[in-house]
Amino acid sequence: MRSFLRELAIAPLAGFLLGASSALFHSSRWWPELTWLAAWRGGAIGWLLGWTVGDVVLAPLLWARSRRARPQVVRPSSRWSGLVTAGLLAAALAPGLLWLTPAAPIRLPDKRPNLVLITIDALRTDHLGAYGSKAGLTPNLDAFAKEASRYDAAYASSPWTLNSFGALFTSLPPSECGLKPPLRESFEWYKRFAALPADMPLLSERLRPAGYATAAELTNPFLASERGWSRGFDSFRNEGGKIATGSPSPLAELVTRRSLEWLRLNRRKPFLFWVHYLDLHVPYQAPTPPPPARSLYPRNWVADRGFWEASIRDQDAATRARYRHFLRLMYQEEVRYADRWVGELLKGIKSAGLWNSSLIVISTDHGETLLDRGAFDHGESMHGEVLSVPLLVKWPRDTEADRRMGQVVALASLGTTFLAFAHSPDVAAVKAPPLPRRNASTGEEVYSEGIFYGDEHTSLTTDSYRVIYHPYAAGADLFEVYDRRRDPEELKNLAGRAGSQPPVHQDVVSDLCTRLKHLTDHAQAAAEEWWARRGGGLPNAPLPESSERELRSMGYVGR
């Protein structure tokens, strides 16, 4: 009997050893820096399988057979080998069961939330069902909005990517974080030299010392490591721009798959994870354009400024209207495509057990004009269709917040919000306030600057008005003022023409124009300070030529 009990112990022991070693071998794939926990888990599964198959199932059969058979037929060695073989075969299934077991949020005793930032480049607010669109383009974003706080009046600090995200990740205006030169026209500087200053701390650099893992899965050449964006990230990957004009690149699928891969690997401590989708950006080349769009497809379609300025604006009204309709159809398909893969990412966050413990934000860097005012993309206008951004915030469990916020807020406040939830001591050092969690009748005033194309001009957005200042213009064209509540499309300028505004607006308009001019002068002084510190604003060498090729493929360089 004692010999038989020893034999019974062999199968589960073999299963434990094989399961533990399998888990250790694969631990770098499933549980980074928690290899011993993985080993014990694998060993437990191996032991259970070895014991179940070796002892509970086969051992009674072998015992019964040995009692019926003659001693020389079933020898102890044969019974021992059968048990060990069964245990080894059963334990070999351990890695498979490890993969199939539900992903549990394996976390150290740190109760701070994960911080997940999902941004979709050039997403217009009015294309989301959650913001009133009836086109049915964003079922996944709309479902997310039902579990989130929706900010109805969120505005970016700049009408294009580099400056907008620079403000978000530094909680400073572009002129104060070194991303706006003191020039009348800055296109060449932005294209070839613009980068985050090395001594300007980023959100990722502030969170890592606070104990957060940091990762970014991005697509946009303006967010490249050469421009300073990899600083503070433990894991940083940027796919750049779209492959080439005329060659659709389904980047959203790739970004989502790689993001889910990272989430599967990193559940050991709170993290900042930034995912940026580029698909909505020019050129609008959805992988599967609808038949109506195909029938309208212009010959030699090239979505850059040269094509639109030379080929479309010179056409007759009917042709321009057809191209405009086609442009919007293609953009809508990009919205639909991005929504599909953002939905897959959200599903993966839920299945990984990270939903309740995470602060998840979905937004964008800027909107898109879509020929509303002659231009077709962004970077040269300070109107609402470009500065307005959707902002949906799913708070961590047990966080109290209203479902709808109507007051004006700055997208740059998001970085401060992340620092506050991470209990970072740097939260007191940043300029922008955190996002409000209660609806209010009055909000912030959002200052925006940093034109990519053309003469620099600035903007101030309040709860009731938008003011645009053209410091290089003259006379009546210095200012534009729009009543956002009565004129949401910003078509009636209340400033600059004698008698053009009702008396009720006169004092308000004057005060707003004065404040915006003061803010612009302050920004100019800050930009000149950065320019002097950089020795003329230029780094040692321009960015590599590959960066310019990517910008050309995105329609930025086409004039």
Image: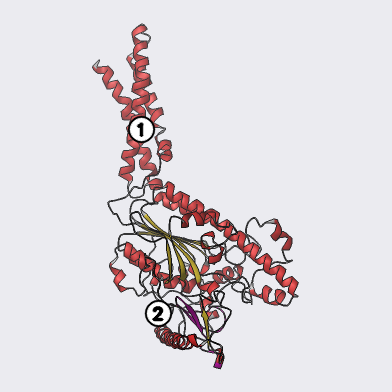
Rendered image: mark on residue 208: none
Do we see residue 514 in this rendering?
A: yes
Dot 2 falls on a residue whose secondary structure is loop
What amino acid is found at the position of numbered circle 2 in the picture?
Glu
x%, y% of residue 6? 27, 21
Q: Which residues are magenta?
A: 447-475
x%, y% of residue 280? 57, 63
**Foreground residue, 341 or 2?**
341
x%, y% of residue 516? 45, 85
Q: Is residue 380 magenta?
A: no
Q: Quadrant of residue 552?
A: bottom right
> Compared with residue 192, is residue 495 higher up or lower down, i.e. above or below?
below
Rendered image: mark on residue 46: 1
Do we see residue 257 in this rendering?
A: no
Dot 1 falls on a residue whose secondary structure is helix
Looking at the picture, the colour scheme in use is secondary structure
Using the numbered discs, state the Cα–Cα distance from disc 2 to disc 1 in whole angstroms. Answer: 58 Å
Quarter that holds the N terminus: top left
Quarter that holds the C terminus: bottom right
What amino acid is found at the position of numbered circle 1 in the picture?
Gly
**Foreground residue, 64 or 309?**
309
Left or right? Give the position of 201 relative to 162.
Answer: left
Left or right? Give the position of 157 relative to 60.
Answer: right
Mark 2 sits on what residue? 176
The crowd level at tag 1 (other Cα within 10 Å; few <14, some 14-19, many 20+) is many
User: How many numbered callouts?
Assistant: 2
Badges 2 and 1: C-beta atoms under 8 Å apart?
A: no
